[in-house]
Amino acid sequence: MAVVTLRNITKRYDGGAEAAVRDVSLDVGHGEFMVLLGPSGCGKSTALRMIAGLESISAGTLAIDGVRMNGVPAKDRDIAMVFQSYALYPHMNVRDNMAFGLRRRGLPRGEIDQAVSETAALLGLSPYLSRKPHALSGGQRQRVALGRAIVRKPKVFLFDEPLSNLDAALRVSMRAELIKLHQRLSATMIYVTHDQVEAMTMGTRICIMQAGGIVQTGAPLDIYRHPVNTFVAAFLGNPPMNLLPARLDRGQGSTLSVTMGDAQLALPPNLGNILLPHAGRDVIFGLRPEEICESSGAPPGAASLRTRVVAVEPLGAETLLVLAAAGCTSEIVARVSRDSMARAGETIDVHLNLAAMQLFDPQTTEVIPIQQEH
C-alpha cells in the first residue's frame, strides 16, 4: 500500500491555450479506492498518466509515500496500470502475459510460477492459462490485464476506464469483481471513469473534475447529498437532480415560500427562518427525483405540486415520471413506486420533500448553504 500526494499538479501541452490539468491537489490514502470522475476532456486520464509517469508534469509535485516522483521513470515508480484496451500480447498465452513483467525483472522461475498460479486462482483464470487472448471473452481478457498488474504486487494500482469496452452485463459483474479485489488486497487504487454509477458503487472517495480542475472531493453519498454546485448536482445521479428556476418569496411574518412557475410552495418554518435573509432572491431549486412522490408515499410536511404527466418510464423496480408544472420552463423527473398508476397526459398531484431541497445561486451556480437545525 502507499500514499499518493498531488500538490498543485499542472499539465500544459505545447501550443495549448489552456492547461489540460490545472493546479490539482489531492491526497490518496493507504488502501483507498479513489475514483477520478468527470466528462470526457476534463483531465482525469491526463492526471492518471502523470501519476503513472506516462506524461511529464509541467508544474507541481507528485509524491508516493513522501518520495518525490517528478522525473522518475514509469518503470521505477512501482505502479501497475490497467488500460481501457487490454494491451495483451496476442502471441502469448495467459500465463506468459501475466508473467511477462516478472520475467523482465529477472525473478526466479519458481517464484514467477507461484505468483501467476495464485493470481490466476484469485481471478478465476486457472482453466485458461494456456489460451491465447483471441480465445478469451472480453471479461476474461480484462481479468488477464488485472492479473498482470496484481502479480507485480505494486504500491499503487491505476485504472484508466478499464470497463468501457465491456457490455452492460459484464460491466456490472466486473464492478463487483473489482470491489472484492480491493477488499482482498487492501491496495491503494486510483480509478478513472466517466460513469457515475461506477464511481458511486466502487469508490471510497470520489474526486469530480471539470475543465482540468477539481470541483469536489468526498465520500460518494456525501457528494450526492451535498453537491457544491449545479454541475456536480446534475452530473452525479441517474436521473440527475431536478434543477428549476425559482424565487424565494416572503409571506406574512417570517414565512417563506419557493415560487416555481405558477406554483408557490410554503417552506417548513425551520427552513424559512434559515433562508429569510435570501427573501426576494432568484435561485435554482434542486431536488433529487426520489424526493418527489405520489400522495401515498408523501412524508410529513411535503409540499403538493400539481403537474401533468409527460411520460412514464417503468424500470421494473421503480418507475420514472416525467412531469410538467404550469409556468415551469424545465420538466421534472420523479422516481416513484413501480406500482404507480400514473399515465401520460393525466394531471396528478405530486409531493416534494422540501427538507431535502438544495438551492443554488443562478450567477455562480454554487450552492446556497442550508444548515438545518437538528
Image (tube, rainbow, N blue to C red):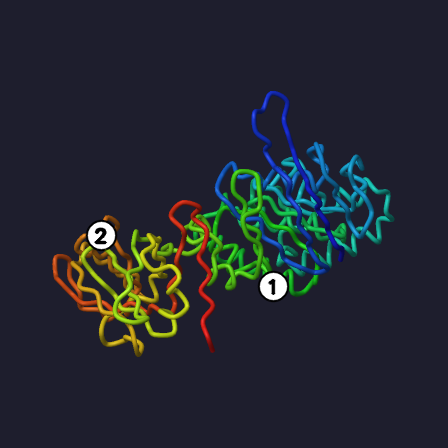
Q: Is residue 168 above or below residue 339?
A: above
Count of numbered tags: 2
Question: In terms of depth relative to the viewer, which is nearer, 124 or 306?
Answer: 306
Which residue position holds label 1?
180
Callout 1: SS: helix
Residue at x 43% of width, y 48% of height: 365
Quadrant of residue 370 within the rendered picture: bottom left
Residue at x 40% of width, y 45% of height: 363
- Quadrant containing the N terminus is bottom right
CA neighbours of label 2 inside 10 A, class few (<14), some (14 to 19), many (20+): some
Q: Rounded to the nearest whole Å, what is the CA distance between mark 1 and mark 2?
A: 45 Å
Picture coordinates of residue 64, whole percent (x, y): 77, 49
Picture coordinates of residue 342, whole percent (x, y): 17, 65
Picture coordinates of residue 255, whole percent (x, y): 30, 70
Q: For the residue marked with disc 1, what is the amino acid?
A: Lys
Question: In terms of depth relative to the viewer, which is nearer, 81 or 351?
Answer: 351
Residue that lies at the very extreme toward the front in this rendered image: 253
CA neighbours of label 1 inside 10 A, class few (<14), some (14 to 19), many (20+): few
Q: Which mark is residue 328?
A: 2
Q: For the residue marked with disc 2, what is the amino acid?
A: Cys
